[in-house]
Image: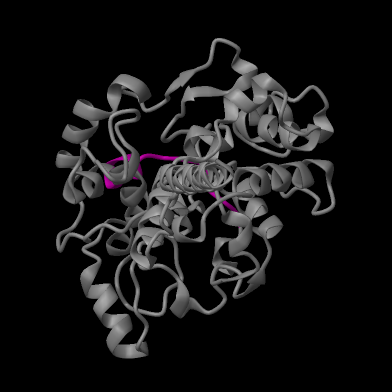
Amino acid sequence: MEHFGYLVRRLFWLFVTVLILVTVLFITLLTYRPAPSPKENTLLVEEKIEEWQPKNVLKALDDGSMSPAVKRGFLLVSETSGQMGPQAKNPNNRFAGNNLSCTNCHLQYGTQAGSGSWVGVVDRFPQFRGRENRIGDLQDRINGCMERSMNGRKLPKDSEEIRAIVAYMEWLGDDLPQEKEKEYKGYPKIKIPEVKVDLTVGKAVYDKECVVCHGADGQGIKKPDASKGYLYPPLWGPDSFNNGAGMHRVITSAEFIKSNMPFGLATYKNPKLTDEEAYHVAGYINSFDRPIKSNTEEDFPDKKLKPVSTSYGPWMDNFSQEQHKYGPFPPIIAYYKEKYNIEKSK
């Protein structure tokens, strides 16, 4: 009997041991996840990058997650007229000369790719600027817009306003994946047509695609609270950008239009207009009178660096003022390549 009891105990502990091993094996199999292969890791990273979206500015404004400086910057760029333009209560704060807002061009509060987005812009400065022929910082670039697109005067570089605008731009891009930087830079290029702008074609495109927002007279639609500027901005006339602005160059304007217009119906990934339509309507828009910037002869000290579609001289070539404004541009581009070995794209 004693021997039998010994066998029973041995069998019992053997059973317990086997049960424990089976349980451990079962749990291991249940929870085991093989390490991703290098290829799978790459796909996961790419998927995460592809899913990245810029900040939801209005949501952050509503939930209070913006810092005071970022919120101030947001108001300055989205309600420019009332904050630092003609509608500002304090005359000393009237730096912008028209009633545009910065976000009339930098769409979706500066987050829309293909519209000169501010997402990641702080990482692109300092940079060389041909218009000044020197290295400039982001504050210089902002002031370039103030004098040209906003038809006004420079902000002091140490001002509360410029610090707040930079803070807003920094906030927009603080989590931008490196792989997305190019997508949010500037305007996608167009294939520059070989022909001169046809103003008749441009007007037809304008009447079909643009007039509903900007009006037959090109003067846009103001917001219900006029101190907050325009819902849809004027494209020419006294309250628009001046002739020193980049948007007054047909090629630059066409790039913006192709990637963003009609508003709400086009993106740079899914444009509505062709390159040719954008080109001709850009020329049509820029055929009308607008404010004239003083001292434009000082722009581009090295005249070889002046964009070919800059409508004001002097230039380092013998092409006419009309051709510099309306094209055709390929012959001018070819001239600078042959004469100076400079590749020009705008």
Q: Position of residue 339 (x, y in %)?
A: 32, 89
> Dividing the picture into quarters, in which one does residue 316 lie?
bottom left
Task: Please say if 279 is above or below 267.
Answer: below
Quadrant of image for the C terminus: bottom left
Color scheme of the displayed model: one colour
Looking at the image, is 24 positioned above or below residue 60? below
Q: Nearer the viewer, residue 224 or 234?
A: 224
- Could you tell me residue 302's position as x and y percent? 53, 79
Which of the two residues, 26 or 203, is positioned nearer the viewer here? 26
Q: Is residue 193 above or below residue 164?
A: below
Observer-nearest residue: 147 or 23?
23
Residue 289 counted in the magenta span: yes
Quadrant the N terminus occupies = top right
* Left or right, residue 228 beside residue 165: left
Q: Is residue 53 magenta?
A: no
Magenta residues span 282-294
Please, what is the dominant secondary structure of the magenta stretch? loop
Q: Is residue 148 left or right of residue 30?
A: right
Identity of the residue furthest to the front in this view: 1
Please provide percent x and percent y for residue 172.
61, 43
Q: Quick check: 42 above or below 22?
A: below
Picture residue at 61% right of the left edge, 61% below the top: 123
> Is residue 168 rendered to the left or right of residue 251?
right
Is residue 242 in view? no
Q: Position of residue 10 (x, y in %)?
A: 54, 48
Q: Is residue 67 left or right of residue 60?
A: right
Residue name at image x 15 percent, y 60 percent: 195
Residue 167 visible in rendering: yes
Instruction: Name the residue rendered at 57%, 76% in the picture.
Output: 301
Residue, x 79% and y 37% (percent of image)? 69
